Image: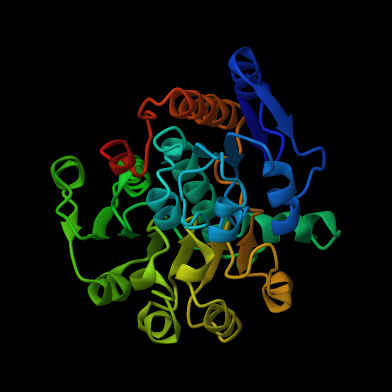
Amino acid sequence: MKIFVTRKIPEAGIKLLEKAHEISVNPFDRVLTKEEIIKGLKGKDGLLCLLTDTIDKDVIKSEPNLKMIASYAVGYDNIDVQTATRLGIPVSNTPGVLTDTTAEMAWAQLFSVSRRIVEGDKFTRAGKYKGWGPMLMLGQDVSNKTLGVIGAGRIGTAFALKSKGFEMKVLYVDGRVNKTLESKLGARRVGLIELLKKSDFISIHVPLIKDTYHLISEGELKIMKNSAVLINTSRGPVVDEKSLVKALKEKWIFGAGLDVYEHEPEISKELKILDNVVLQPHSASATFETRSKMATIAAENMIAGLNDEIPPNCINPEVFEK
């Protein structure tokens, strides 16, 4: 069968697909337009897409022979799963594989912001360092502080567990009791307001759904400690970016670490000039090992779907019940 891959992925996935099917890969190292995706999908049986691709009903309906959509990502808010399901098309993602990798990035951001690593690097490279000073680059201690985790799913749990070596008190917000965090860390499930008031560090690990859009906005930011650090490696629109800029400029909070943005790939000009925010290019899963595993999983999902088998990571398995 024929498969369209919207952007080059690691060779492990490409080679796996080539063993079983004919594939066409976007030759450009950029996000394709909707029209380009539709053109590339013409005459194809499978679509392997990225989180940056908008796979709406127009794209899905454009190819009547489409049998499988495999996403090279954990999140799938970019795909109209409802339309795919109605048309009997399986959709898959790549969960689990990037759990620890993303959790590690959240910690990297946490330390970078709290100890002003990026700011200090720029300061030193600019020749401004003239010797040790008692008030130079003062930051925040991490050990023995309170860590707030918003969303205690796979990634949130992995992130929180890594706090054990720093003897932190852990609070979490989630729809369910997390027995792992409570038994291993003595973590406590609380409401969002309590978490925001009491946490020194807050890390967001929720999917983007209607209820999480602008979950953190002006009201929530004002509740936080002025020494608090906010980390977001989930989805950009979970945080109201305009309110965050205001909070950082007016020092409502100490700082923030962002890997995602509300209007990706566009980033607020004001964010770019602030010293108390560390910006990453949506690269939380960007390690050689993880990206290669993601490619393999996406390819395995695709192959299973085209063979009329339930993909290992199928989002809408109900299509096989018809």
Residue at 53% across, 65% down: 236
Tell me where residue 176 sits by quadrant. bottom left
| Quadrant where the image shows the C terminus | top left
Residue 185 in the image, given as x and y percentages of width and height: 20, 45
Camera-side residue: 126 or 225?
Answer: 225
Q: How is the image coloured?
A: rainbow
Residue 105 in the image, given as x and y percentages of width and height: 52, 46
Residue 188 in the image, given as x and y percentages of width and height: 16, 58
| In the image, residue 322 above or below residue 31 | above
Residue at 52% across, 83% down: 243
> How many discs mark residues in the rendered view?
0
Determine whether, in the image, residue 92 is placed left or right of residue 285: left
Residue at 65% across, 17% down: 18
Q: Residue furthest right?
A: 127
Camera-side residue: 251 or 319?
Answer: 319
| In the image, residue 185 above or below residue 144 | above
Determine whether, in the image, residue 280 is placed left or right of residue 142: right
Camera-side residue: 167 or 11?
Answer: 11
Residue 196 in the image, given as x and y percentages of width and height: 32, 73
Decide if residue 209 is in sight here.
Answer: yes
Q: Residue furthest top?
A: 19
Determine whether, in the image, residue 3 is placed left or right of residue 228: right
Q: Residue furthest front?
A: 64
| Quadrant where the image shows the N terminus | top right
Decide if residue 33 is in sight here.
Answer: no
